[in-house]
Structure formats: structure tokens, C-alpha cells
Image (tube, grey):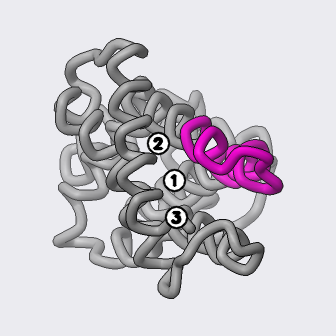
Amino acid sequence: MVREGSPAKRAAIGRAALKVFLAEGYARAGVDAIAAEAGVSKRTVYDYYGGKEQLFLSTIAETRAGHEKGFEELLDETLDNPADLEDALFRFGQAFATALSRSEERTAIVRLMIAEAGHFPDLLKDRPTRTALADRLAALHERGLLDVPDPVEAAEFLGLLVTGPIQGRSWYGAVRVGQDEIDHLVRRGVRIFLSAYGK
């Protein structure tokens, strides 16, 4: 039976699991290695998570939840009540694209999720960040600042326009892209988005 146990110990196991899964992938990662990294016994890992599969899924979910919280905060800071829509979209895109291209953890998690999607297809089903962005774009539509009859589609296009070129040029984080280049590509992406959805 899985138990809740100590929050500090659970957090230590989660951090250790993330490190080992990112380094080794799901198949090669061992519970022994995770337990050693966390400084707990193998039995404790099983007591807290039940098994390797549940530990993997929980670790990915908890890590993504942290990223999603940061994304919501970015939306609050940039798109909640913009005085200048183009500038607000640029600031959103700049921060988002920079974070994606510079965060080794985010890049590694994306690679891990893609690699393991065949065994865990549900990993790629939920897109909470796209939904959150779609909600903001719908609100801007209601205010008459954008024309987005399909906010989910618009959110997908905006995400691709502000991050796609940087992801491509950085080979998904393998090569560093300078901030001036990021800013230039994001600015172009925002202007293309506004040419399609602006009023």
C-alpha cells in the first residue's frame, strides 16, 4: 500500500527520480539508483510510489505542474491587461522562448516524454499550457483586441511562431542561441501572428 509519508522525503525521492530518469531514460533507470540518489532505502521508494512506473509518471506530472505554474504567472504578467498588445505578446514570447531554449531541464523532459510516448501515450495528451494561453487569447478576443474564432488553434500558432524558430536553431537546447537572435525571431513571430489575428 502506497503511503504519503514525509513531504521532505517524498520531495527528495522526486528530485532523485527526475535526475536519474533524465540521465538514463525510463528503461535503464533503476530504483536502486534512485534510492541511492535520494539517500533512502529501495523499500522506501516502493512504499511512497508503489513502483517504478508510478514513480516515473508522478515525477513527470509534478515537474510539469511546476512549469505550468510558472507559465500561468508569465501569462498574468504579460497578457492579463495589456496596454500595448504587440509589446505584451513580444514580452510573453521573449520570456517563453528564452526559458525553453535555455532550460536544460525543460529540454531534457521534452526529449524524455517523446522518447517514452510509445510506452506512455498519455504523456503527450494533455496540453495545459496551450489551454491556458487559449483562455488568455479568448479574453483578448472578447475585449476586441484580437480576432480569434478558435482560441485553441490561435494559441497553438502563437506558440509555434514564438518558439519554433528558436527551437529549430538551438536543436532543442543543444546549441545556445543569443538573446538578440531570440528577440528578433520572437518579434517576427508576433507580427506574423498579429497579421493573421490582429484587428
What amino acid is labelled 3 in the image?
Gly
Q: Nearer the viewer, residue 110 or 57?
A: 110
Count neighbours of disc 2 (C-alpha within 10 A) and say few if under 14, some if 14 to 19, many if 20 or more. Answer: many
Magenta highlight on residue 84: yes
Magenta highlight on residue 126: no
Residue 87 placement, left or right of 161? right
Q: Position of residue 111 (x, y in %)?
A: 25, 46
> What residue is disc 1 on?
59
> What residue is disc 2 on?
17
Of the residues under marks 2 and 3, which one precedes in the sequence? 2
Marks 1/2 in contact by CB < 8 Å: the verdict is yes
Above or below — where is 14 with respect to 120? above
Q: Position of residue 29 (x, y in %)?
A: 28, 44
| Residue occupying the point 70% across, 74% down | 144
Q: Is residue 103 visible?
A: yes
Q: Nearer the viewer, residue 97 or 46?
A: 97
Marks 2/3 in contact by CB < 8 Å: the verdict is no
Secondary structure beneath label 3: loop
Mark 1 to mark 2: distance in Å?
7 Å
| Secondary structure predominantly adopted by residues drawn in magenta | helix
Over which residues does the magenta segment extend?
Answer: 69-91
Q: Position of residue 120 (x, y in %)?
A: 29, 72
> What residue is disc 3 on?
198
What amino acid is labelled 1 in the image?
Thr
Of the residues under marks 1 and 3, which one precedes in the sequence? 1
